[in-house]
Amino acid sequence: MSSFEEGAVGLRLDPEPTVPTVAPNMKAAIVAPLPNAPAPPREDMVLYTLIMAMVVFGLVMVYSASAVYAKQKFGSATHFLHRDLIYAALGLLAMHIGARTDFGAYRRWCYPLLASAIGLLVGVLVTGVRINGARRWFHLGGLSFQPAELAKLALVIYLAHSLAKKAEKIRSFTIGFVPHMLVASLMMVLLLLQPDLGTAVVLGVTTLIVLFVAGAKISYIVMAFLAAAPVVYQVIVGTPWRMKRMLAFLDPWQYRHDVGYQITESLISIGSGGATGQGLGDGKQKLFFLPEAHTDYIMAIVGEELGLVGIGLIALAFSVLIWRGAKAALGARDAFGTYLAFGITTLFGLQSLVNLGVVLGALPTKGLPLPFISFGGSTLIVDLFAVGILLNISRGAPEPVPELVGDRAALARLRRWANRRRRGGGQRVVVENAP
């Protein structure tokens, strides 16, 4: 007897007949699992448990921060809670899909995803809905979608794919640095036209960090920062309302009833919470004093109701998230997975840092929600999908055998050929599974 793999599948035939050719990777496709084979690698359960806890906590705080406002504006105290539950359910489904899909599949969809994200950023400038002076959202029925969220993930996937493909050429200025900065700059310009300076800065910094991790020369990164500095300065100084925000950041109480209103109310909220807070649901600033209490400034409500302890626990949770993301990156099976995990983790880290900095008055006011906790439909869905990708990378599983389905089809064709030979008489060929 000859066999494709010992103990798996065999052919028994007389010498003369010729057996159809089988694909070279046939053996990997048809070998049955060994009885004592090790269990498949599991996702990072610490990361999974942490994210689930943060989503549940976010739902509680969204209801606490929005109930009075929702009752007054929509006639139902649970208006935002119901919507956030829908977004959370869709996001958890997306996380499940991301965790079950091998992350290597995104390399095939890298460029279509990038083109789609850029197209949506252009489209929102034309047909998007303008809210608070910014055109950042598409409204579809009763739901909204912010293409900037998809753009962040698309850019990270593109960077990971391109940097992994270029390998040793990463240290080249024209091949390893300029093309990636051009793509990121295009997205940043489209975001500034919305306008959305906060997300544009997050994209730029994320790009430079991923380039640094991939091995780009530090001199190139420093040069990029120096080149961006006058642009950022002009964007701020050349826009009156941004300049007012900067002045309010430097002295918020001087602009207490103008552009500094949000930050001063946020500081009052956090200050009144003390060390342990006034109690969940007992905050006062959400009673029409603090704007955007359930979105960008939800951490101010956390500080008021749960105190410094609550803020410290959230900061600790994001620190653990960054740690587990970095651990997944370092344990990835290939360079693409490493860069992808580092990019996603950097996005989460920067967004949480900026949000906490704004709420605490350490950074100028920016419209960035807190991942997993603030109310925000497309943000929560895309963020949870990105966590699913991190979970898949954290498994450290080997790359799936290519063309597995095709190999099974080849085995089926081989068996049909053998049966036809047997029915037609002459030499007998049997395809059998060995015990």
Image (tube, rainbow, N blue to C red):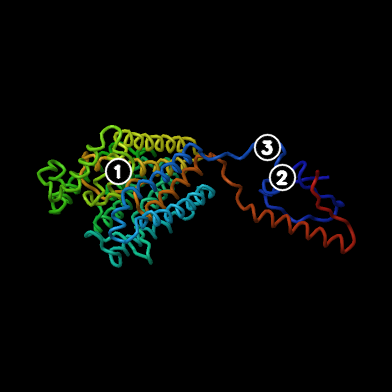
Give the SS element for disc 2: loop
Q: The disc labelled 1 sits on which kind of residue?
A: Asp
| Residue 360, horizontal then vertical, whole percent | 24, 39
State yes or no: discs 1 and 3 in contact (Cβ < 8 Å): no
Image quadrant where one finds the N terminus: top right
Is residue 324 shown above or below 411? Answer: above
Image quadrant where one finds the C terminus: top right
Give the SS element for disc 1: loop
Structural distance between the alpha carbons of marks 2 and 1: 60 Å
User: Which residue sits furthest right?
Assistant: 426
The residue pinned by badge 2 equals 32
Q: Can residue 220 be seen in this view?
A: no
Other-residue count near label 1 (Cα within 10 Å), few / some / many at <14 / 14–19 / ≥20 = some
Q: Residue at x 82, y 60 (%)?
A: 419
- The mark closer to the camera, 1 or 3, is 1
Structural distance between the alpha carbons of marks 1 and 3: 55 Å
| Residue 142, horizontal then vertical, whole percent | 37, 64
Q: The disc labelled 2 sits on which kind of residue?
A: Ala
Give the SS element for disc 3: loop
The residue pinned by badge 1 equals 282
Q: Which of marks 2 and 3 is nearer the N terminus?
A: 2
* Disc marking residue 37: 3
Q: Earlier in the sequence, mark 1 or mark 3?
A: 3
State yes or no: discs 2 and 1 in contact (Cβ < 8 Å): no
Other-residue count near label 3 (Cα within 10 Å), few / some / many at <14 / 14–19 / ≥20 = few
Q: The disc labelled 3 sits on which kind of residue?
A: Ala
Return the residue nearer the eye: 153 or 54. 54
